[in-house]
Structure formats: C-alpha cells, structure tokens
Image: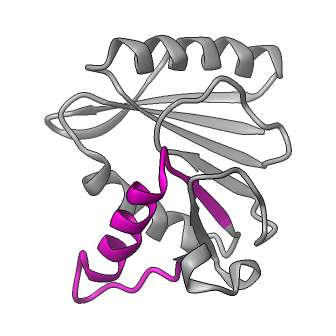
Amino acid sequence: MRIDFYHLTSSTLQKILPQLAINIDKTKKHAIFLFKDDNEVEKFNDYLWTFKDTSFIPHGSKNDGNENLQPIFLSSEFSNPNDAKFIVYTSPLNNINPEFERVFIIFNGNNKMELEMARNLWKKGIALSAEMHYWQDLPEGWVEKKL
C-alpha cells in the first residue's frame, strides 16, 4: 500500500481535486473520493463537470446512479461500489483502510484538528508498513518532502 499525504497551506480542494482526479483516471484504476457530507459531494460533482472546457473527468455520485460503473465515485459514506483500488480522503479520518492499493489524504495545514489527525494517520501508515509520501503546496507548486 502507498499513502500520499497532501498538506494544503495555500491551495484549496478546488485546485487539487481536478488534477488528482485526472492523474488517477490516467491509471485506469477506479477511485473513491470521500467527502465530509453530501453537500460537498454534490458541490464537487458539479465542479468536476465544469472546471475546464477542455477536460473530461469521468465521475459520479449515488445521485447519478450506476455506482459500480463510475471510474471515480464521489461519496460522503464509505462504500466501495466501483471496486476502487484508490481512495481519496478530502479531510483526514481516524483510520486508514488497508484494502486499497493507494490512499490519498488531503488535509488543511491551517486547521489544528486536521493537522493532528494527519499526524496520527502518518503513524498508523508506518505501523501498516505502507510506502509513505508527504507533499506540501509551496509557491513553486507541489513538492515532496522527506520526513
């Protein structure tokens, strides 16, 4: 398992999620994007359809139906209807689900609670012997940091 932590300091979910979705789609593996609530799901479901005229990101939520066929499934509840190999947490949770090949954890570095949760998840990832990567948004772009 590989775990990538994305530490937001000046960037936003609206900036990072489309590019992350595009990169994941290129792998031809299904993914789940897990959000804090249904409002966030629908906000990003709409946003991913319209963020760029020249891009198409195949995705959907439970409101779109055909969950098992969605390459990128957006949800506020954990389930794996599309047999995803990747999961993207848009804010840190308490546990890491080891059933996925790759886990992406996005957290707001300006939020003390999210920062602490990310630290705890880092420790859990190490305990799972996961391949760990830490990325931070800097003025020059995303930079991988060694920890």
Q: Is residue 37 magenta?
A: yes
Tell me if residue 100 is in the magenta stretch.
no
* Residue 61 drawn above or below residue 34: below
Residue 39 higher or lower than 62, as above or below: above
Residue beneath the point at 52% across and 83% down: 58
On the rendered structure, is 145 left or right of 120? left
User: Can residue 147 be spotted in the picture?
Assistant: no
In percent of the image, x 43 and y 21: which residue is there? 114
**Residue 22 seen by the camera:** yes
Q: Position of residue 107 (x, y in %)?
A: 41, 31
- Residue 123 placement: quadrant: top right
Residue 110, above or below 11: above
Q: Nearer the viewer, residue 83 or 40?
A: 40
Q: Position of residue 71 (x, y in %)?
A: 64, 77
- How many marks are shown on the rendered structure? 0
Q: Residue at x 71, y 26 (%)?
A: 95
Q: Quadrant of the N terminus?
A: top right
Q: Is residue 79 left or right of residue 37?
A: right
Seen from the viewer's position, the closer of residues 145 and 33 is 33
How far across and how far down the image is residue 74, in percent? Answer: 55, 64
Q: Is residue 46 left or right of residue 76?
A: left
* Image: magenta residue range: 31-59
Residue 102 rendering spot, x and y as whole percentages: 70, 47
Q: Is residue 135 left or right of residue 76?
A: left
Taking depth in this image into account, of 39 and 88 the one nearest to the observer is 39
